[in-house]
Amino acid sequence: MHVAVVTVGDEILAGDTINTNAAWLGKRLAERGVDVERVTVLPDRVGEIARVVNEYRAEYDAVIVTGGLGPTHDDVTMEGVAAAIGRGVERNEEALAWLVEEGGYERDELTAGTADLPRGARPLHNEAGVAPGAVVEGIYVLPGVPSEMKAMFESIEGEFEGEPRYVARVETSEPESELVPRLAELRERFDVSVGSYPGDGVSLKLIGTDEATVEAAADWLRERVELDG
């Protein structure tokens, strides 16, 4: 399964807010064997959201969009997603009923537009907040508040499934440039992908679909590098 993640918010682009949602989603999806192939940050502009979401939904199995939900002037994500699929936005009675019956709100307490979703969308109820999310044509729209986003994703994460992946890590004190020949040989010998992440030393991440192969590759590598610590 191949997925694109889109986060919406001028505050992210300005550096006022750190994009923790994308990092959290990437980790959770990877644990489920799902390939995240794009992470994109967009401004609070309907046209930009519509253009990118429309492009990504044609290329990937699913698009996850976070941020910009609610009734305020800069909450335009639902409108952008609706435009991407050529639909309008309308009040979703199921979402509104849930807010009243389960959320404990009176209808006149809710700001106009709170339960507006793309026409025909399946609402995703917000157990940790107010603004509902939505699913429509493979596009999953989640809140930007991290606690709300996580709770909502956990309610639908069973819809994201891929081939199981196994991971092993090898930490070495050697410079990355000196590891190139051994990493090339490793890839020839074993059916694994290798990520190399330099810092104080180098962290080598081995990923594969067969657990025994990943462990064998890690053992082979540990015998041929200077281990860190």
Image (cartoon, rainbow, N blue to C red):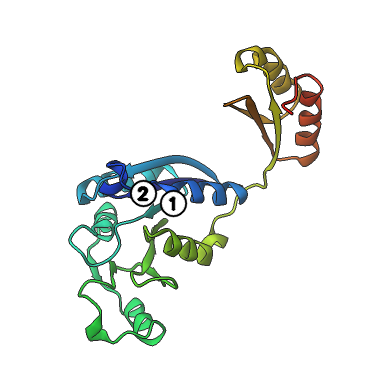
Does 186 sit above or below residue 207?
Answer: above
Q: Amino acid at mark 2?
A: Thr
Image quadrant assignment for residue 128: bottom left
Pick the front one: 86 or 193: 193
Does 23 sit above or below residue 202?
Answer: below
Q: Amino acid at mark 1?
A: Asn
Say whether disc 2 or disc 1 marks the residue closer to the N-terminus. Answer: 2
Q: Could you say where residue 156 lies in the image, as x and y percent from the top left?
A: 51, 64
Marking on residue 21: 1
The residue tagged 2 is: 7
SS of the residue under disc 2:
strand
| Residue name at image x 44 percent, y 73 percent | 127
Q: From the viewer's perspective, tell me whether residue 10 is left or right of residue 176.
A: left
Image quadrant assignment for residue 121: bottom left
SS of the residue under disc 1:
helix
Q: From the viewer's perspective, tell me whether residue 228 is left or right of residue 130.
A: right
Q: Are marks 2 and 1 in contact (CB under 8 Å)?
A: yes
**C-alpha distance separating marks 2 and 1:** 8 Å
